[in-house]
């Protein structure tokens, strides 16, 4: 029979893990994987055995000694104006500094800190909201966290909760949780360079209550493929070669 002390220690251990998600810091990710890069992915909707192109996603990562800049541009089929998001963060810790987002439906700027300030301009409703949101814990910008997944100390069995901040008046606002639920070994077949040894990483988040599966190159942490499942809808993004 387990002693009371053993049981209490177990409860404390479980509680500590649950209450200590990954937050910005010098030891929260592996800096060796962060390099200036530009790449494109094609975004597909999946239906049974068919896939239909939704659009293209272009990503640019620029870093210097002090600041990291991540710029994503989503060009949807049938739309002339792209969605552009730009994130800046401290290079050493990935502590978020600023996030701007512009598309045909709305514009948004977030300045990060203990108080998140900025604005949200809903173009459809012709309504501008001043943002002043107090936070109690540290967090990553939600726009950066999918890229952060590729920089984690991945290995089989790795699991971790991640604190992220997201602002969406029609869904959720504030510090939310993303969870790496599974990491396993796998292979991805590249068109130009053959089979690649990859980490297959499954992640759930509270932004959309969806699940994403990332195929990340073990050698250089390139993202080759991402599978997405949200509310019964299945999508996929493939790296352009």
Image (cartoon, grey):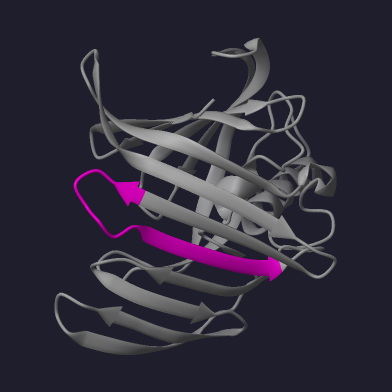
Rendering coords of residue 184 (x, y %): 63, 20
User: Looking at the image, which residue is at 51% across and 60% down?
Assistant: 142
Residue 222 is left or right of residue 39, and the answer is: right
Residue sticking out furthest to the left:
125
Q: Is residue 76 magenta?
A: yes
| Quadrant position of residue 22 | bottom right
Instruction: Name above or below for residue 144 compared with residue 226.
Output: below
Number of marks drawn:
0
Q: Is residue 109 magenta?
A: no
Residue nearest the observer in this picture, 166 or 138: 166
Residue 117 is left or right of residue 153, and the answer is: left
Instruction: Name above or below for residue 215 compared with residue 171.
Output: above
Name the magenta segment's main secondary structure.
strand
Rendering coords of residue 176 (x, y %): 48, 61
Q: Which residues are magenta?
A: 75-89
| Picture quarter with the N terminus | top right
Question: From where the camera sits, is residue 16 visible?
Answer: yes
User: Looking at the image, which residue is at 52% across and 71% down?
Assistant: 99
Residue sticking out furthest to the top:
194
| Picture quarter with the C terminus | top right
Question: From where the camera sits, is residue 95 visible?
Answer: no
Residue 217 is left or right of residue 86, and the answer is: right
User: Looking at the image, which residue is at 34% across and 49% down?
Assistant: 75
Rendering coords of residue 143 (x, y %): 51, 58
Residue sticking out furthest to the front:
80
Rendering coords of residue 144 (x, y %): 57, 56
| Quadrant position of residue 88 | bottom right
Instruction: Name above or below for residue 91 compared with residue 22.
Output: below
Residue nearest the observer in this picture, 88 or 141: 88
User: Looking at the image, which residue is at 64% across and 58% down?
Assistant: 19
């Amino acid at each position: 029979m387990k002693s009371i002390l053993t049981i209490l220690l177990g409860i404390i251990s479980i509680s500590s893990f649950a209450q200590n998600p990954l937050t910005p810091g010098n030891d929260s990710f592996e800096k060796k994987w962060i390099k200036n890069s530009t790449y494109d992915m094609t975004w597909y909707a999946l239906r049974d055995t068919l896939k239909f192109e939704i659009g293209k996603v272009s990503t640019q990562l620029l870093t210097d000694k002090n600041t990291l800049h991540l710029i994503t541009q989503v060009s949807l089929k049938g739309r002339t104006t792209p969605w552009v998001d730009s994130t800046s963060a401290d290079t050493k810790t990935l502590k978020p500094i600023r996030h701007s987002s512009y598309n045909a439906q709305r514009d948004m700027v977030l300045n990060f800190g203990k108080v998140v300030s900025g604005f949200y301009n809903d173009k459809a409703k012709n309504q501008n909201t001043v943002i002043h949101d107090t936070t109690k814990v540290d967090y990553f910008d939600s726009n950066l966290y999918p890229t952060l997944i590729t920089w984690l100390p991945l290995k089989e069995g790795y699991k971790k909760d991640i604190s992220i901040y997201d602002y969406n008046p029609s869904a959720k606002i504030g510090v939310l949780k993303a969870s790496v639920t599974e990491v396993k070994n796998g292979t991805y077949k590249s068109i130009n360079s053959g089979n690649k040894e990859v980490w297959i990483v499954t992640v759930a988040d509270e932004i959309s209550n969806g699940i994403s599966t990332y195929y990340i190159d073990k050698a250089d942490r390139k993202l080759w493929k991402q599978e997405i499942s949200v509310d019964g809808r299945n999508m996929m993004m493939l790296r352009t070669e």
